[in-house]
């Protein structure tokens, strides 16, 4: 797919929460800014960072108009992601984590998977599962696959959602289990879920994971 020119209404809103990731956050920002699909907005939520993360994301925001930075007081992951959802304008929503990396066609891959299959949710493979398998599922089939963790899990990165899926639904704003709470609800309400297991997103493990 050729690079698409940004217009007034982005097709995709990419949401990333960052907190004290000065060693890693620039790497993921670069991954998103160099995507083959360019019609997106990149919402970065600085979740009360105490290191240089906030300054780093501001620097990128000053260089690229697709980046929108929100600085907020420290909260849990869910409340930070909700802050991004509240201003998102894209037809689709994708999430990335500040200490991971993704392939340059990550957004293009998921966008085409959703569009070509008229899917509410599109899912790619991750670091731990690079499988050249395609499946288009209804909610029941997708939920069974989720519960058995056959091809994907409850993590929001690796997935793209139609924005309408979040109408009336948000992440939990207390506790640490925001993914476990919301992902089953997203899958259960989806009419079609498209999965292609090629690995386009890479979860990075390091000593600062928490």
Image (cartoon, rainbow, N blue to C red):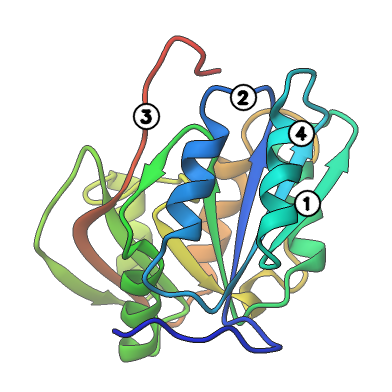
Separation (CA) of disc 1 from disc 4: 10 Å
Q: Mark 4 points at which residue?
A: 55
Along the polypeptide, which appears first: circle 1 or circle 4? 4
Q: Which of 94 and 46 is in front in this view?
A: 46
- Identity of the residue drawn at 50% across and 18% down: 209
Separation (CA) of disc 2 from disc 1: 15 Å
Q: Does residue 124 appear anywhere in the picture?
A: yes
Q: Which mark is residue 21?
A: none
Along the polypeptide, which appears first: circle 4 or circle 3? 4
Q: Name the residue under label 2.
A: 22
- Identity of the residue drawn at 43% across and 37% down: 100
Separation (CA) of disc 4 from disc 2: 9 Å
Residue 50 vertical position relative to residue 190 in the rendered view, above or below: above
- Identity of the residue drawn at 29% across and 84% down: 1
Q: Does residue 172 appear anywhere in the picture?
A: no
Q: In the displayed structure, does residue 70 sit left or right of residue 43?
A: right
Q: CB under 8 Å between callouts 3 and 2? A: no
Q: Secondary structure under badge 1?
A: strand
Q: In the displayed structure, does residue 65 sit left or right of residue 30?
A: right
Q: Secondary structure under badge 4?
A: helix
Q: Secondary structure under badge 3?
A: loop
Q: Secondary structure under badge 2?
A: loop
Along the polypeptide, which appears first: circle 3 or circle 2? 2
The label nearer to you, 4 versus 3, is 4
Q: Mark 1 points at which residue?
A: 69
Residue 155: x and y in percent read 46, 44
Instruction: Work out which residue is located at the far right of the displayed protein and give it.
Output: 73
């Amino acid at each position: 797919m050729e690079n698409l020119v940004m217009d007034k209404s982005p097709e995709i809103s990419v949401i990333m929460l960052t907190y004290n990731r000065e060693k890693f956050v620039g790497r993921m920002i670069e991954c998103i800014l160099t995507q083959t699909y360019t019609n997106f907005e990149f919402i970065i939520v600085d979740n009360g960072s105490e290191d240089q993360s906030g300054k780093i994301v501001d620097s990128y925001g000053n260089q690229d108009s697709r980046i929108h930075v929100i600085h907020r007081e420290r909260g849990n992951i869910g409340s930070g992601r909700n802050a991004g959802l509240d201003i998102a304008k894209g037809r689709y929503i994708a999430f990335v984590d500040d200490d991971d990396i993704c392939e340059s066609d990550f957004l293009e891959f998921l966008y085409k998977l959703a569009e070509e299959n008229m899917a509410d949710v599109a899912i790619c493979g991750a670091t731990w599962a690079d499988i050249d398998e395609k499946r288009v599922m209804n909610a029941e089939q997708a939920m069974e696959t989720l519960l058995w963790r056959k091809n994907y899990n409850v993590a929001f990165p690796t997935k793209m959602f139609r924005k309408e899926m979040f109408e009336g639904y948000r992440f939990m704003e207390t506790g640490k289990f925001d993914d476990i709470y919301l992902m089953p609800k997203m899958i259960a309400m989806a009419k079609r879920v498209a999965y292609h297991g090629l690995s386009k997103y890479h979860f990075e493990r390091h000593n600062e994971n928490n």
